[in-house]
Image (tube, helix red, strand yellow):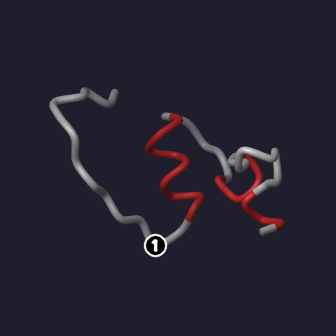
Amino acid sequence: MIVDRGQHDYEFNAPPVASVVVMGHTSNGNVEWEDENEIKLKDI
């Protein structure tokens, strides 16, 4: 569980690691995350 206790910056070494932390389950940030034009991170 992530508890918001204010604003913090975190740096991750890979999109999949960050995606797991944000989503709370196994995921791949390279294919889950998109920009405002719906282009997946892996395609940028």
Q: Is residue 30 left or right of residue 8?
A: right
Pick whichever, 26 or 11, lies toward us.
Answer: 11
**Residue type, numbered disc 1:** Asn
Residue 29 image point, x, y percent: 64, 53
Image coordinates for residue 15, horizontal then vertical, percent: 57, 61
Q: Is residue 7 above or below residue 5?
A: below
Residue 1 horizontal side relative to residue 25, left or right: left
Question: Counting other residues with Cα less than 10 Å from the Cα at mark 1, is it few (<14), some (14-19), or many (20 or more)?
Answer: few
Q: Indicate the quadrant where residue 16 lies.
A: bottom right
Q: Residue furthest left?
A: 5
Residue 8 at what x, y percent from top left? 22, 48
Q: Which residue is mark 1?
A: 13
Which of 9/25 is in front? 9
Residue depicted at x 73% and y 60%: 41
Query: Residue at left 77%, top 53%?
Result: 31
44 lies left or right of 19: right
Residue depicted at x 16% and y 30%:
5
User: In this picture, is 5 found above or below 9?
Assistant: above
